[in-house]
Amino acid sequence: MLQQVRGAHRYIGSSSSNAKRAVQHLDPAEVPPKLLFVTSEMTDFVKVGGLGDVSSALPRALRQTNDIRILIPGYRQVTGGREIALVAELAPFAGLPACSLGRIDMADGLVIYVLVCPDLFDREGTPYADKNGSDWVDNDVRFARLSFAAAEIASGVPDLGWKPDLLHLNDWPASLAPAYLSWRGLDVPTVLTVHNLAYQGLFPRERLPVLGVPDSSFQMEGVEFHGNLSFLKSGLYYASHVTTVSQTYAREITTPEFGCGLEGLLQTRARQHALTGILNGVDESWDASRDPVLPASFTSTNLKGRSINAAQAREAFGLGVSRGPLFAIISRLVHQKGIDLAIRAAEDFVQKGGQLAVTGQGDPSLENAMLDLAKRNPGKVGVKIGFNEAEARCLFAGSDFLLMPSRFEPCGLSQMYAQRYGSLPVAYRTGGLADTIEDGETGFLYSEMNLSALMNAVSRALGAFASRSMLLRMRRKAMSRPHNWLHSSRRYNHVYEVLLGVR
Ligand SMILES: Nc1ncnc2c1ncn2[C@@H]1O[C@H](COP(=O)(O)OP(=O)(O)O[C@H]2O[C@H](CO)[C@@H](O)[C@H](O)[C@H]2O)[C@@H](O)[C@H]1O
């Protein structure tokens, strides 16, 4: 509902659910840099995958030293039933429609700018796709509008009484912002964080005029990628600095194997010292001693509660009572995550007394393959297709091992959540998995991307399970691993300081 309130419009509804996070205080002696963090998901409102968690946690860690605000599209999950003051109007540009800019002040003081445009964003579905999983056909306009709004705010029009010194953009949906700034001759520093190079935002050349992209930029030194417009490439090319979410992935994406065809450009950015890997963290809500959704709490020194969680997880997933190992998969069910390999490995370990509980959704063919696996193995494999954060937490806290055979993994949060909750990840030595798992200490890594290497790692996990003392030692060590956001935020601050000329 729209209402006129003291010169501003607002949507009326219930307040935000995210009131629990700690307030960060800025040092009044310093003028902190003003940052606009632009994202297409934020777990406070809507989460499709890891980007949602990062967008909720990282800005809050960065608030200690920066005046940071968020810009997010006004999806139904953001605007629905919430009071939003409308603070500015944004004019149309090329084929991008006019929008309003709303503002939400979160309970912890974090300021969120919301791009309100019901025609583009007020829909039933995820940020990227309809309820059948098909990408919205106008995703180019939707996210060009987001990128353009970011550039407008950085240019100081509209006047919000707050103008960012730097834009921090995330993934392809925000990636046209540095290009829009460049085409307008505006010299605002920009950081682009790549959470997954495989999602690029590719659209046909004919869309250039609709999106206000100049023809002259449609070339290799610009936005063109094999005859298409690439949002992500635009960002990689025009951003002042590119970061990605682990050091290993930052190296990997400069190679043909992991570079998705963009390795040449990424090598150039690396040579310019404009490509940095910064590992994600785990936010403080991941604490098994006080997570309200867990059936039983526990700590690394008192693990008793874990067996209660395991029993409940077995019941919730229709698994039989067992003293054998419980494996979990908590994942988007997509090719990247190696789900096909996991299914084949599971066929084997359930014959050896193991069980598997799966919560995930994604590619319909992988969803069906998982459901078939469960049908073939009643009481041994339980699968729930869907996205349920509470269920995921209970599974991290009740399983013995997390199966995560990703073919590539920019960082991966699930393996860090699993470690924090005492479930040992079994994963391929790639990207952030290589940077966060110590083989034989806090999980199990294998070094060749094939089924037999995965099965070998699973065998080693089964061996550890048979030796209770080894399992306990590894579990305790994994739980104590310090993956915190403060460490990551220091590294982002360094990048900002260099760009802002503070260093
Ligand atoms: N069905 C389900 N129900 C409940 N929860 C579910 C779920 N499916 C997935 N999740 C949760 O979604 C998140 C997934 O995050 P990941 O980082 O592991 O992968 P993702 O590929 O989405 O993220 C991308 O971005 C992040 C952030 O930078 C990178 O870590 C990663 O490598 C990159 O691929 C985790 O919190 C997981 O628990």
Image (cartoon, grey):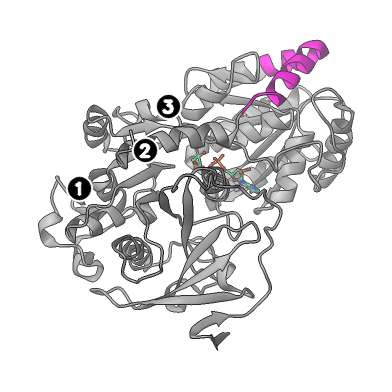
Q: CA distance from mark 3 to mark 1?
A: 28 Å
> Which residue is at the far bottom?
4
Point out residue 154 in the picture as x, y percentages from the top left corner. 32, 60
- Whether the residue under disc 3 has CB within 8 Å of ligand 1: no
Instruction: State the residue at coordinates (34%, 37%).
Output: 502
| Lower position in the chain sequence, tag 3 or tag 1 | 1
| Lower position in the chain sequence, tag 2 or tag 3 | 3
Left or right: where 431 falls relative to 292: left
Residue 426 - label? none
Quarter of the image with the C terminus is top left
Q: Say how many tags the image has.
A: 3
The magenta stretch spans which residues? 460-482
Eye-nearest disc, 3 or 1: 3
Instruction: State the residue at coordinates (52%, 62%).
Output: 112
Residue 375 visible in rendering: no
Q: Nearer the viewer, residue 313 or 94?
A: 94
Left or right: where 175 falls relative to 268: right
As shown in the figure, which amino acid type bears the numbered disc 3? Gln
Q: Residues within 10 Å of mark 3 (few under 14, many from 20)?
A: many
Q: Secondary structure at mark 1?
A: loop
Q: Which residue is mark 2?
A: 497
In terms of image quadrants, where is residue 473? top right
Q: Is residue 463 magenta?
A: yes
Q: Secondary structure at mark 2?
A: helix
In terms of image quadrants, where is residue 501? top left
Q: Residues within 10 Å of mark 2 (few under 14, many from 20)?
A: few
Q: CA distance from mark 2 to mark 3?
A: 20 Å
Q: Which residue is mark 3?
A: 247
Point out residue 33 in the picture as x, y percentages from the top left corner. 41, 48
Quadrant assignment for ligand 1:
top right
